[in-house]
Image: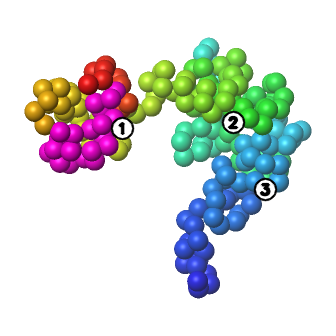
């Protein structure tokens, strides 16, 4: 492997913004105090935090910098950016347990209002997102190759018994495993087609 930027990029295109090492992103960093979103207590954070909060009747909106996904960011004492809603939790309630995340009840990424925040696990966060319709499903998913109409046609076609899953898979240009998961109700559950 050569030296310079091209050599580093060959190892991984991710460079950690915490430890500056190539090969992992910030959410996988194990340097310093563990996770990138577990800042050490910073006595200057509350003062800096409040400079970027716009209080409204509903959400308190973060007016400072944003991460690429729309969540607020603030510079922490241990030389890393942390999410603004996490900083709000730290300021109002103290440390966040290692296995927990700070979640929003209001579904506004810029919100830092403490009574709109609650603790939950990664699984809680995923279930909350699915329950509130924030996860792409069915034909709206970025990797979907079939439409809802095609899935209904596949189930009907298989229920008639005239063809095999392999033949249906060839017809629609998908893997036989995809047809199997549709017919057994493992995928496209939102259509409520049941099992064949």
The answer to which of 82 and 133 lies nearer the viewer is 133
Q: Which residues are magenta?
A: 164-185
Front: mark 2 or 3: 3
| Circle nearer the N terminus (2, 3) | 3
Residue 6 horizontal/vertical position (percent): 55, 78
Image quadrant containing the C terminus = top left
Mark 2: secondary structure: helix
- The residue labelled by disc 2 is 84
Q: Earlier in the sequence, mark 2 or mark 1?
A: 2
> Local crowd at mark 2 within 10 Å, few (<14), some, or many (≥20)?
many
Q: Which residue is mark 3?
A: 31
Q: Nearer the viewer, residue 185 or 11?
A: 185
Main secondary structure along the magenta-highlighted residues? helix
SS for callout 3: loop
Which residue appears at 54% of the width and 25% of the height? 127
Q: Residue at x 48, y 21 (%)?
A: 132
Tag 2–tag 1 contact (CB < 8 Å): no
Identify which residue, 98 or 79, lies in the foreground.
98
Q: Is residue 184 magenta?
A: yes
Are the residues flagged by discs 3 and 1 in contact, CB closer than 8 Å? no
Q: Residue at x 61, y 26 (%)?
A: 124
Can residue 81 be seen at all in this image of the molecule?
Answer: yes
Q: Is residue 140 visible?
A: no
**What SS does tag 1 mark?**
loop
Which of the 4 image quarters holds residue 29? bottom right
Q: Is residue 161 left or right of residue 107?
A: left
Q: Which residue is mark 1?
A: 141
Image location (x, y in percent) of residue 175? 28, 47
Q: Residue at x 59, y 62 (%)?
A: 14
Q: Nearer the viewer, mark 2 or mark 1?
A: 1
- Label 2 to label 1: alpha-carbon separation: 29 Å
Residue 126's quadrant in the figure?
Answer: top right
């Amino acid at each position: 492997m050569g030296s310079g930027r091209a050599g580093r990029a060959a190892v991984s295109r991710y460079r950690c913004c915490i430890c500056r090492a190539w090969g992992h992103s910030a959410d996988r960093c194990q340097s310093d105090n563990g996770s990138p979103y577990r800042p050490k207590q910073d006595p200057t954070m509350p003062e800096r935090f409040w400079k970027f909060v716009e209080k409204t009747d509903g959400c308190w909106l973060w007016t400072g910098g944003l991460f690429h996904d729309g969540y607020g960011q603030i510079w922490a004492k241990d030389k890393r950016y942390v999410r603004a809603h996490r900083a709000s939790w730290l300021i109002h309630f103290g440390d966040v347990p290692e296995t927990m995340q700070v979640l929003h009840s209001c579904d506004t990424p810029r919100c830092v209002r403490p009574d709109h925040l609650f603790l939950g696990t990664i699984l809680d966060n995923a279930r909350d997102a699915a329950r509130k319709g924030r996860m792409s499903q069915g034909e709206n998913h970025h990797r979907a190759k079939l439409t809802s109409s095609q899935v209904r046609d596949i189930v009907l076609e298989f229920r008639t018994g005239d063809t095999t899953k392999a033949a249906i898979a060839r017809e629609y240009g998908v893997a036989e495993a995809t047809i199997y998961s549709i017919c057994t109700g493992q995928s496209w559950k939102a259509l409520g087609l049941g099992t064949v």
